[in-house]
Image (cartoon, coloured by chain):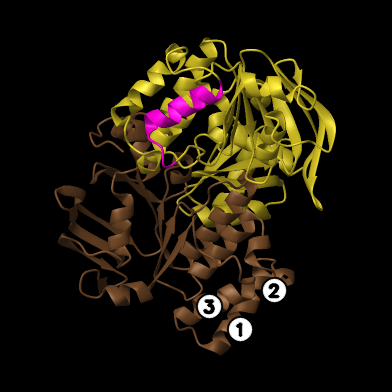
Amino acid sequence: MENVIEVNNLCKRFGDFTAVDHISFHVCKGEIFGFLGANGAGKTTAMRMLCGLSFPTEGEGRVAGFDISREAEQVKRHIGHMSQKFSLYEDLTVRENIRLYAGIYGVPDKETTERMESLLRKLDFSGEGDTLVAALPLGWKQKLAFSVSIFHRPEVVFLDEPTGGVDPTTRRQFWEMIYEAAAAGITVFVTTHYMDEAEYCDRVSIMVDGRIEALDSPGRLKEQFGVGTMGGVFDHLARKAKRGE
Amino acid sequence: MIRVSEIWKSYGKTDALRGISFSVNRGEIFGLIGPDGAGKTTLFHILTTLMLADRGHAEVAGHDVVEDFREIRRCVGYMPGRFSLYQDLTVRENLELFASVFGTDVQSNYGLIEEIYRQIEPFNNRLAAKLSGGMKQKLALCCALIHAPEVLFLDEPTTGVDPTSRKEFWQMLRRLKEKGITILVSTPYMDEATLCDRIALIQKGNILQTDTPAQMVRSFGHPLFAISSVRRYDLLLAAREYPEILRCYSFGETHHLLFRGTPCPDIFKQAMRMSGFDDIEISPVDPTIEDCFIQLTSL
């Protein structure tokens, strides 16, 4: 199967501190990959390198077919990104947000208009196209933010703590959107420190002190560590951590 | 220790609380479990006398939240959801400030915070702004405890904190309970519900159900099944099309399934096999608090 993310011995040092310590892994096309670790384990640093926002000190990586060191600009064009903290402009309307992001990623105007209206219908947002994002409930914002992050049809989308704070039903609707995107061939890379969320992924990796200490499907990891939940797997591994927060 | 009776509160046209009633016994850890926007923070503001309800009554430690607000402020500790410490004061300065505001000093009730405080003591002279999330949370808890309150209000203390720190935090709460402190804690995370003595599920300003976690799960009332296949998403869509299925929703690696009438897992399995899910597995499963929440909100 085709690999959309491929990382070999990726390493990032800040002075004497090795934030990401020679990690290697790959993610297949259409896979939902969970990227876990405690606060300070190196997740964010690693993800920034994969998004072309930070250069590796050593090692190499390819994302969507481009080299993250030499072709960072191409990487940025071929990925999508959504974070819980910031994704949409609150003081723009739903349509303005979609147009802005579509414009940044160079989606042609005509195509934007057509795709935008069908997206609004699909999300059941048709009545809310001209509503300010600030006025939307959190669950709607999250669904919209995800839709915007894949509007330009990237090969891979990075989701940074995507579903905090919403009710269980809304959260499931969100995961179904992720399943649907993955079924359409978009690779999904999710960071989270909520372990029940990890169970929704095809495979997960767990970082401890800058290294990947475990990588497999949630089912096989639970079996390997003889525990019933991903929280149990995490506890086993996090206990080894020497690095403080 | 806490008695809430028919509390209403609206902001303009939005009803934040719609006639909420519950009570918390002395020495209990009581959890308010619900998503953002459910009304949890509004309720905390009313109970800690920072805001007045539109209608209804509430008492904390035997004091009325309107008439006796001064007494309440002396005998409760409150850790708000957003980091509430003084960013430009050090760890030690924050603690001393909170102690002096309540007319006490750090030594008087040191025994209560010692175990938690020892973990942040090495950073005594660090500005609060420079602390990591887990350490800020511990300092905020120390500050909320320094005057030995009878009741502790914790508004989403574990949001944004990693699983290991969350677990440690809940262990700290158990030990505070042993010291006789009553705790009202809110969280959007269903998996933390089982760590409380009793819980209220709350959504859109209404309490859906109040009970012990074990009793709530027992009252679920329907046989629940887990189904799985390598083609996870396709299976979810196919199961929903099957006429005998009342509800099917994703649940981590599996999907949870409820039948309309008498469960017929074998017939369902056969039908799914015929639709090309050769590897389908179906087995009965115990409901969780999250299943209860979904059940109560999809009636």
Q: Which chain is indicated by disc 3?
A: A
The relative height of residue B267 versus residue A238 in the rendered view (above or below) is below
Cα distance, mark 2 to mark 3?
14 Å
The relative height of residue A155 versus residue B60 in the rendered view (above or below) is below
Which secondary structure dominates the residues rendered in magenta? helix
Image coordinates of residue B106 in percent, x first then y, are 44, 18
At x 57% / y 73%, what residue is drawn? A97
Please, what secondary structure does the residue beneath circle 2 have?
A: loop
Q: Which chain is indicated by disc 1?
A: A
Cα distance, mark 1 to mark 3?
12 Å
The shade of chain B is: yellow
**Residue type marked 1:** Thr
* Viewer-proximal residue among A192 and A34: A192
| Earlier residue among tags 2 and 3 | 3
Q: Residues within 10 Å of mark 2 (few under 14, many from 20)?
A: few
What span is colored magenta in the figure? Answer: B87-102
Cα distance, mark 1 to mark 2?
14 Å
**Residue type marked 2:** Asp
Asked if residue A203 lies left or right of residue B294, the reply is left
Image coordinates of residue B25 in percent, x first then y, are 68, 15
Look at mark 3 in the image and give the residue it sits on. Answer: A100
At x 46% / y 79%, what residue is drawn? A104
For residue A113, the mark is: 1
At x 54% / y 42%, what residue is drawn? B82
Image coordinates of residue B118 in percent, x first then y, are 34, 21
For residue A130, the mark is: 2
Residue B198 visible in the snapshot = no
Chain in brown on the image: A
Residue A111 visible in the snapshot = yes
